Image (tube, coloured by chain):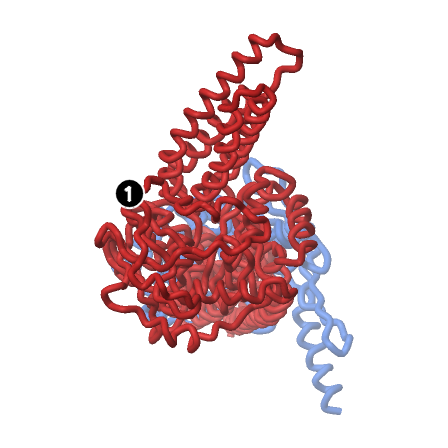
């Protein structure tokens, strides 16, 4: 799947009525099966951009065109929320900085849960393969609380790939891990996305990690509002303290 | 993982909270169900239309008390009515009001169980139908033969017919003793009626055996009357019904002989008192265990259960209850007041007066089946009866074996002529049947169960009975419905209100419990959304959880409610409340559906909160 962002803006209205622009991305593409690292500091709007691409948040304007092979291109920005949810469940896998696993479910169940909202029957064999691949062959029936932070994140990786997605969005997936774990999780993400043929957008502030991916993008360069966002924020703080 | 697995998984995650919520629903539904079941069952019992009999004819007084006492064995009998009230009903079968009529006398007990003196027709058996058929057939034959043809006959044909009638009448008259013996075993009142038909027979035969044609034609007319009376009698011979088409039947042994000291036990009596065939019992006077009548009855049969208060009764022949001297004395007393308008008002028995000279001698105690002849009492004096029925003038009129050698032997103490201080009220014939001292004009019963063809006929019956001023006719269905509406309905309404409040409370518990869990699970909900669950999916997930709690709690509560009622009934209850197995009525199903809907509505509140959970806000990396 390739994704084309055109003229994306996202603005929030604060409770006091003031409007803040978070995103203003004139153009951004990811090709099918392409691995892209996105570098951005805190507050640069990278999470919002991921949410827009995942269909979790609708942009204020612009289009997010997803080209699924065998389907006419889908503009995620124009879909109603329920359709975006369904599209995300089927085609997009998300990995968060913290694992965001469900505490009451075992590793296996968490992966199966990822298959629950696609309208297709769960593929337990694939789930087992994923967990074996991420090195949790003996930990499938463990609940997240019984797993280490690194193991938890591996389960999260396996879950993101449960539906054989066409696009994997990873938001600082190694941010909470020590360097050795970070390295191996990163390798798993890359190898598994390659295995399923998905495109990967990996957001990180770690330049070394970014170097390991084929293409690198600096969010500050494509998001015209990132500097204004900071200044507007500063201005508001100044106004409040006055 | 489908949606139900997901829900169950989530519920198991907070098992304690889920179970406690289910428990609160369970208790609510249990309470409500038991109230509904008791209310419905009480309603069925008290509002039943199908008592088998459509009316009870009894002494004037409280209509409700008559029904409560006669049908439910609650409270005391209200008094007695004259036998001729029954006679009138029995003589008009299939007529304007009564299809069948069964007289009964109550008031005494055995070990606390009600004794009912009654007709042999109370218990159904094949002999009743064959007796009815025989009477009708004999009567029809005689009537048809005796009925004059429409066209004038030749002298020869007339002579021929008269001869035929004479032959048949004589033949029937010869058979009468046998017929009466059989009838006496079946039902004393049929016996008694045949006795009165005997007079018509004698009149017919005396006419038919004259030489003059006119007298002989009068004999033919009398023979026709005999035929008609036999047919009428045959039509009246119908067994008692405890419900539409349901009769009291023998489970073990046989029905009592209607003229002997025999009895049959209701199913519950036999079971609870552990009595069996061959056992003996006596009558506790007025229900008091210290005051027992001397006569002894023998159990000859046990009835099949019917699930009504008729299972908790001991049945004895009416004639045997009249044979108790104290009962006889009471009826004599009632007759002495005869003629005064109040004679049908309840009369208090002065047992002291009765008892003063009535203590039975051990030797003279009449036990059926003992010596062939026992001194039974004294000669029945020929009191002038109101209708001057000639049958009382006959010295041995009621003997089925009417021969001089078998005539009842006069007791040695026959000189005693004080009505109120004699020891016996009857004689025993050689075959063990009872011959009462008391004239039929003095017989009294507590009431009469009457079956009418329909409600319209009940109206006729009531009007007819009450016009005469001797008794009243009460519809048990009508009285009990009114009673239920007046006394039981308001109470159960309040209980139902409480039950519904408890159910609403349970729904609020569901709401609070799930709402708290939704607040605690915001992040989980956001994760499900991120994994592709739509808002509606989340909404249904939470609502279904509430529905599941309502359904599980409701079903368990329904079972619990029935269990509670069953246990309650087995502990304090009464077989008159017919709760058989898990017989869930439409109302309980409707209530259960209501509970589930209420649970769904309660679940909708937290579900809407879950619906509004923002994915972006709740997934933001910390």
Q: Secondary structure at mark 1?
A: helix
**Does residue A130 appear in the picture of this structure?**
yes
Of the chain colours in the picture, the one used for chain B is red
Q: Residue furthest bottom?
A: A242
Residue B424 in the image: state x and y as whole percent: 35, 62
The residue closer to the viewer here, B329 or A128, is B329
The vertical placement of B157 against B614, above or below, is above
Left or right: where does residue B276 sit relative to residue B313?
left
Q: How many marks?
A: 1
Colour chain A is painted in: blue
Give residue B405's quadrant in the image: top left
Q: Residue B302: percent from the left, percent from the top?
A: 31, 51
Left or right of B491 in this view: B293: left
Say which chain tag 1 marks.
B
Q: Which residue is mark 1?
A: B405
Task: Tell me if I can see residue B518 in this picture.
Answer: no
Q: Residue at x 29, y 61 (%)?
A: B412
In the image, is B253 to the left or to the right of B422?
left
Figure quadrant of residue A46: bottom right
What residue is at 77 percent from the left and 75 percent from the top? A18
């Amino acid at each position: 799947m390739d994704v084309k962002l055109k003229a994306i803006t996202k603005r929030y209205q604060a409770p006091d009525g003031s409007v803040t622009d978070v995103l203003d991305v004139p153009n951004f593409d990811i090709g099918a099966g392409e691995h892209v690292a996105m570098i951005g500091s805190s507050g640069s709007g990278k999470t919002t951009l991921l949410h827009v691409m995942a269909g979790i948040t609708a942009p204020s304007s612009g289009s997010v065109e997803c080209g699924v092979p065998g389907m006419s291109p889908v503009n995620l920005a124009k879909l109603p929320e329920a359709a975006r949810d369904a599209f995300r469940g089927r085609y997009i896998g998300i990995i968060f900085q913290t694992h965001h696993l469900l505490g009451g479910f075992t590793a296996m169940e968490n992966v199966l849960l990822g298959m629950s909202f696609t309208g297709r029957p769960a593929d337990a064999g694939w789930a087992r393969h994923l967990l074996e691949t991420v090195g949790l062959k003996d930990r499938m029936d463990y609940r997240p609380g019984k797993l280490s932070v690194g193991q938890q994140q591996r389960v999260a990786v396996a879950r993101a790939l449960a539906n054989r997605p066409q696009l994997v969005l990873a938001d600082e997936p190694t941010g909470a891990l020590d360097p050795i774990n970070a390295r191996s999780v990163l390798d798993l993400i890359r190898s598994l996305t390659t295995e399923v043929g998905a495109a990967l957008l990996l957001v990180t502030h770690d330049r070394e990690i970014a170097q390991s991916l084929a293409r690198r993008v600096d969010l500050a360069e494509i998001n015209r509002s990132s500097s204004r966002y900071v200044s507007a924020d500063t201005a508001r703080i100044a106004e409040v303290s006055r | 993982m489908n949606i139900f697995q997901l829900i169950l998984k989530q519920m198991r995650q907070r098992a304690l909270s889920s179970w406690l919520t289910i428990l609160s629903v369970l208790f609510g539904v249990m309470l409500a169900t038991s109230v509904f079941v008791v209310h419905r069952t009480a309603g069925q019992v008290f509002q039943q239309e199908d008592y088998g009999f459509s009316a009870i004819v009894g002494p004037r007084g409280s209509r409700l008390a008559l029904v409560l006492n006669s049908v439910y064995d609650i409270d005391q009998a209200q008094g007695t009515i004259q036998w001729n009230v029954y006679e009138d009903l029995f003589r008009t079968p299939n007529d304007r009001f009564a299809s069948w009529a069964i007289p009964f006398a109550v008031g005494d007990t055995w070990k606390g169980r009600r004794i009912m003196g009654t007709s042999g027709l109370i218990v159904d058996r094949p002999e009743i139908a064959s007796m009815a058929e025989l009477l009708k057939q004999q009567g029809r034959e005689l009537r048809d033969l005796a009925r004059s043809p429409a066209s004038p006959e030749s002298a020869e044909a007339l002579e021929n017919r008269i001869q035929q009638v004479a032959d048949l009448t004589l033949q029937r008259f010869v058979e009468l003793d046998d017929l009466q013996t059989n009838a006496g075993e079946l039902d004393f009142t049929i016996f008694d009626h045949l006795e009165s038909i005997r007079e018509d027979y004698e009149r017919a035969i005396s006419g038919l055996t004259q030489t003059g044609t006119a007298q002989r034609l009068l004999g033919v007319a009398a023979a026709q009357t005999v035929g008609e009376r036999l047919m009428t009698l045959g039509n009246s011979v119908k067994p008692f019904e405890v419900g539409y088409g349901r009769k009291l039947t023998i489970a073990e042994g046989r029905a009592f002989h209607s003229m002997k000291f025999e009895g049959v036990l209701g199913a519950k009596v036999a079971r609870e008192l552990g009595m069996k065939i061959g056992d003996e019992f006596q009558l506790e006077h007025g229900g008091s265990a210290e005051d027992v009548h001397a006569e002894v009855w023998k159990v000859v049969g046990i009835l099949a259960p019917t699930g009504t208060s008729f299972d908790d009764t001991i049945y004895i022949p009416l004639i045997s209850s009249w044979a108790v001297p104290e009962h006889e004395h009471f009826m004599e007393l009632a007759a002495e007041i005869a003629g005064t308008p109040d004679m049908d008002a309840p009369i208090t028995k002065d047992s002291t007066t009765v008892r003063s000279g009535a203590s039975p001698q051990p030797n003279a105690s009449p036990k059926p089946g003992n010596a062939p002849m026992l001194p039974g009492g004294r000669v029945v004096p020929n009191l002038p009866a109101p209708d001057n029925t000639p049958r009382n003038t006959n010295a041995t009129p009621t003997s089925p074996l009417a021969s001089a050698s078998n005539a009842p032997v006069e007791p040695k103490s026959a000189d005693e002529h004080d009505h109120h201080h004699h020891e016996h009220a009857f004689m025993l014939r050689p075959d063990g049947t009872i011959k009462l001292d008391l004239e039929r004009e003095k017989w009294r019963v507590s009431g009469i169960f009457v079956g009418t063809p329909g409600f319209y006929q009940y109206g006729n019956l009531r009007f007819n009975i009450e016009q005469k001023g001797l008794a009243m006719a009460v519809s048990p269905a009508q009285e009990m419905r009114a009673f239920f509406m007046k006394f039981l309905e308001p109470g159960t309404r309040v209980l139902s209100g409480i039950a519904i409040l408890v159910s609403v409370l349970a729904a609020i518990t569901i709401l609070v419990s799930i709402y708290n869990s939704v607040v605690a699970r915001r992040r989980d909900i956001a994760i499900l959304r991120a994994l592709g669950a739509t808002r509606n999916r989340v909404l249904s997930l939470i609502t279904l959880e509430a529905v599941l709690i309502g359904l599980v709690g409701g079903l368990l509560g329904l079972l619990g409610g029935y269990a509670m009622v069953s246990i309650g009934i087995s502990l304090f209850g009464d077989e008159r409340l017919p709760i058989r197995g898990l017989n869930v009525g439409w109302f309980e199903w409707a209530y259960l559906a209501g509970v589930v809907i209420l649970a769904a509505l309660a679940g909708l509140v937290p579900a809407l909160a879950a619906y509004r959970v923002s994915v972006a806000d709740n997934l933001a990396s910390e």
